[in-house]
């Protein structure tokens, strides 16, 4: 298993390798409009077959910005520092994937590009925009130095109100904040569909008793928790990777919270806490699967498919996600945008070589990605198959999972 540092170092090394074409590394950022040849391709028709666009939700779409447009967004300056080359390279890849530059107007350019990509989706299909709170210490104090970036709830909410036909929003509230309960209630009143956490980067321990009032509030408001689990590679996560152990989510589940595990905990290893604090290290996906298979969590626990299909998350884990037919109604589509535009971390040809795609599908996906990485990610997950089985259409009709005050009956069937 490659570490974040080793993987990004490999990307950096490839920048100076003459045989590697530039398009393998950087997104071309041409027009988002698809050529007629792609629009009329039979595979384009196939990916939407059986899906009601009004029920389609991409639950994992990141907002980024510098704050220059009054958004309040912030990027950690260390991502520009020559003393932190890995994070500097990460930023370059992310901005390129979103086709924006670190120049005045970034906030508006990011949203404009997102809307241009979304124009290829049928009416009714919506993206769920993620806010992202600061890192906080155990005493509740905000720590900017340990925060990779910041996206205010107010900004995500504003965009959802400006573009109600295309966007919904997911708030982010750190549970250690003094005003955490008030902030969650305010987010719910403002139309937030869920709360987003990335524990290793934001500094919250999902198993901490200090989260209990927070969980009780989420359960009362019927507001889901979309939380990262497994190892974190995309942003600086400090020394808190243990917070991504899926078993630490039992505390939320046992208090009635509907939990959506980002990426299905598909990277890294965690301590088997069911065997004590010094239990053996096993794959985080194995721990996630254990929780999924516990009957008491059948109506509360879900997994999102954000980043599934990347080079580091394919193989046996991807195969299991496709083949577990009893899980299909509890899997939720997410793209992890802008990551689908980071060229080196996806390989349709590699997936074809491993039997997940047909060759003609890999060719179609590579061409589609040149124009629209957002649609590419959806198409990839629609076309992936194992032994003739693909992800069920219910995975992509995930509006029901975020509906406030309604029970998802299909999750337990």
Image: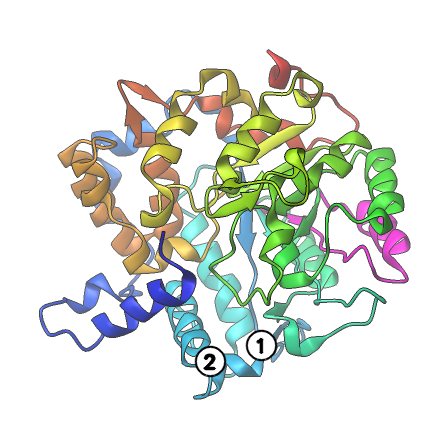
- From the viewer's perspective, is residue 171 above or below residue 81? above
Label 1, secondary structure: give it: loop
- From the viewer's perspective, is residue 95 above or below residue 323? below
Viewer-closest of 22 and 54: 22
Q: Of the residues under marks 1 and 2, which one precedes in the sequence?
A: 1
- From the viewer's perspective, is residue 299 above or below residue 209? above
How far from the left and from the top, in percent, is residue 370? 26, 55
Please rate how many residues cluster around mark 1, counting C-alpha atoms within 10 Å: few if below 14, some from 14 to 19, many from 20: many
Label 2, secondary structure: give it: loop
Looking at the image, what colour scheme do you see? rainbow
Tell me which residue sits at (34%, 37%) in the image: 379
Considering every residue shown, the one lying at the far front of the view is 278
Considering every residue shown, the one lying at the far bottom of the view is 82
Locate the C terminus and report the quarter of the image it occupies.
top right
Viewer-closest of 351 and 398: 351
Quarter assignment of residue 149: bottom right
- From the viewer's perspective, is residue 211 above or below residue 154? above
Magenta stretch: give its range.
166-193
What mark, if any, has residue 66 been given in the picture?
A: 1
How far from the left and from the top, in percent, is residue 51? 45, 24
């Amino acid at each position: 298993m490659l570490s974040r540092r080793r993987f990004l170092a490999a990307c950096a090394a490839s920048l100076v390798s003459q045989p590697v074409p530039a398009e393998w590394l950087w997104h071309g950022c041409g027009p988002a409009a698809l050529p007629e040849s792609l629009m009329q391709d039979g595979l384009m028709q196939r990916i939407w077959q059986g899906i009601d666009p009004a029920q389609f939700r991409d639950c994992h779409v990141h907002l980024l910005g510098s704050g220059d447009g009054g958004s309040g967004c912030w990027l950690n300056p260390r991502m520009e520092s020559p003393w932190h080359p890995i994070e500097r390279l990460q930023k370059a890849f992310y901005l390129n994937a979103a086709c924006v530059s670190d120049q005045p107007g970034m906030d508006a350019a990011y949203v404009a590009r997102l809307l241009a990509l979304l124009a290829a989706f049928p009416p009714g299909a919506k993206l769920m925009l993620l806010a992202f709170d600061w890192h906080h210490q155990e005493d509740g104090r905000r720590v900017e130095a340990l925060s990779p970036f910041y996206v205010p709830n107010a900004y995500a909410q504003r965009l959802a109100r400006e573009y109600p036909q295309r966007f919904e929003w997911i708030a982010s509230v750190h549970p250690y904040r003094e005003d955490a309960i008030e902030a969650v209630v305010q987010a719910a009143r403002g139309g937030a569909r869920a709360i987003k956490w990335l524990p290793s980067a934001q500094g919250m321990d999902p198993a901490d008793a200090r989260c209990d009032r927070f969980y009780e509030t989420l359960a009362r408001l019927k507001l889901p928790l979309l939380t990262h689990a497994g190892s974190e590679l995309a942003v600086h996560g400090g020394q808190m990777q243990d917070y991504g152990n899926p078993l630490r989510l039992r505390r939320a589940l046992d208090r009635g919270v509907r939990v959506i595990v980002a990426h299905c905990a598909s990277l890294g290893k965690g301590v088997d806490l069911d065997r004590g604090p010094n239990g053996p290290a096993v794959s985080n996906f194995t721990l996630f699967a254990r929780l999924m298979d516990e009957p008491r969590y059948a109506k509360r626990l879900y997994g999102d498919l954000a980043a599934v299909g990347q080079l580091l998350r394919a193989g046996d884990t991807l195969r299991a996600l496709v083949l577990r037919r009893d899980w299909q109604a509890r899997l939720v589509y997410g793209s992890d945008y802008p990551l689908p535009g980071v060229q080196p971390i996806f390989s349709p040809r590699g997936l074809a070589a491993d039997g997940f795609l047909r060759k003609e599908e890999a060719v179609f996906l590579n061409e589609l990605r040149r124009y629209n990485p957002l649609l590419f990610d959806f198409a990839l997950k629609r076309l992936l198959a194992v032994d003739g089985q693909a992800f069920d259409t219910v995975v992509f009709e995930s509006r029901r999972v975020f509906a406030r005050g309604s029970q998802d009956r299909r999750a337990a069937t």
